[in-house]
Image (spheres, rainbow, N blue to C red):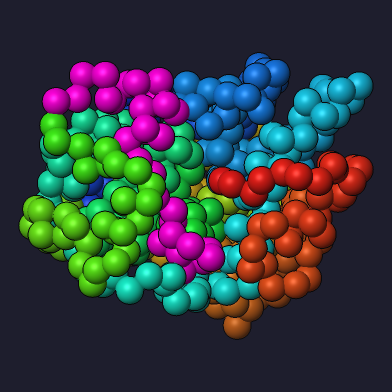
Amino acid sequence: MNWHWSPALDMAPAERDRFLADALPGCYPGEPVRGPAPGGRSAALKHLAGYDLADYGRSRNFTAGAVSRLSPYLRHGMVSVTEVRDAIKTRYATEPARSEEFLRQLAWRDFFDKVLDWHGRGLDDNLENAKHPVERVRGLPADVAAGSTGLPCMDGILHQLFDDGYLHNHQRLWFAAYLCHYRGVSWKEGARLFRQYLLDGDVASNNSSWQWVESTFASKPYFMNQENIDKFSGGEYCRTCRVVCPFRASYDDLQEKLFNARRAPLQMVGRHEPPKPPVVRDPVRTVAPAAVPCASVVWVHDAAMSPDDAALKANPTAAVVFAFDERSLRREPWAFHRLAFVFDGVVELMRGLPNPVKLVTIGDPATDLAAAAKQLGAATVHATDHPNPWVRETTATLRKSFAVTDYARPVLAEYTEEPRRFSRYWDKSAGQVLGYAPKGGKKFQK
């Protein structure tokens, strides 16, 4: 077990980034460069407090629209879906209709969490048969991995992904449709790419959305044309584009082109290669001072990073442990901006907690938590539940040696049926989310 907490606690952000880069060799692709978004609960709350959704319903589908950009903070539990819901409902208490569309979109996250809760690791594979006969290939094309497809829209999306870790939902859908339907690449390759680079990359929303585009979790595949890209990007890509556009056609013509053959139209463009493993250096290992004994340990995982987390609030005198999953990160490295975003949240959280022992480890979470508990003399581990399989698998392993207390995570709605389609979920759950029954007639687009 390797302790990496005390040296980083009082470092300036730039120094902390260098420390993180040296502590996690082989766990990120490329150079250790952080993105523009700061992590942590204070940034999340500031973002939420300053968000104006007055124009959300009209503009949310535009890449420059009034979207909240709260998803990275929601993904990592720096703010919860119920906190966002309650803040928005309070702000628009006298005009609830103004916030309805935003809350309905927020509910997609709750829906996708329920999909993961139901299927677990099954979400890594097709949930349904694809609604088309076109074959898919594995391996990410080299030009896609380099952001050099030659299409200004796709390259612009990729470079924004690589540099910032954020994409508007429409950009995600366009790229997913391009990779799956035009290039004939398995959705699993795209889902992996997004998990690595998106600040909000996860299994629930990410894998479900890719399957929604592919039609393995929808009644039909999603695809777009050039007119759609031009309209909702405000001409950002098309205005100066000089290439032969594969998207410039009617939807009827594209439907024929994309799905009435065995092979995608651009499948043979570029070379399909397995991802290159990152260069692995010897990590910097430091040991924290000896910790005082504690009767219990709280595991803070990367989806529960708030002082208002149920497990933390219930155990202010327990030791607190956050574990970077080194083995998982070596198998699927995260962009450094993702790691830095998370570490921002870890540092802020640990600084503000009253708990007497606060540790960050790099290794295998179950092994490190067990070692920490034994070193501290703890007999109980506390953790907030999450449908992410690695969270539940870790707690299952810990139960073999310790008493484990699970705490419920915040949810927008109770829903006991299999979550197959958002429309049915919303029919059953809208009253819980909104506090009233919405009027009918809404479309259920993403």
Count of numbered tags? 0
Residue 228 part of the magenta-drawn span: yes
Determine whether, in the image, residue 270 is placed left or right of residue 163. Answer: left
Viewer-side residue, 35 vs 235 = 235
**Splitting the image into 4 quarters, where does residue 183 fall?**
bottom left
Residue 152 part of the magenta-drawn span: no
Task: Give me the residue at 91% from left, 21% from top.
Answer: 94
Determine whether, in the image, residue 6 is placed left or right of residue 27. Answer: right
Magenta span main SS: loop
Can residue 410 be seen by looking at this rendering? Answer: yes
Viewer-side residue, 237 vs 196 = 237
Task: Give me the residue at 56% from left, 38% from top.
Answer: 71
Q: Is the residue 259 above or below the residue 66 in the image?
A: below
Q: Is the residue 40 above or below the residue 324 in the image?
A: above
Determine whether, in the image, residue 166 is placed left or right of residue 372. Answer: left
Q: Position of residue 289 (x, y in %)?
A: 47, 46
Residue span colored magenta: 213-242
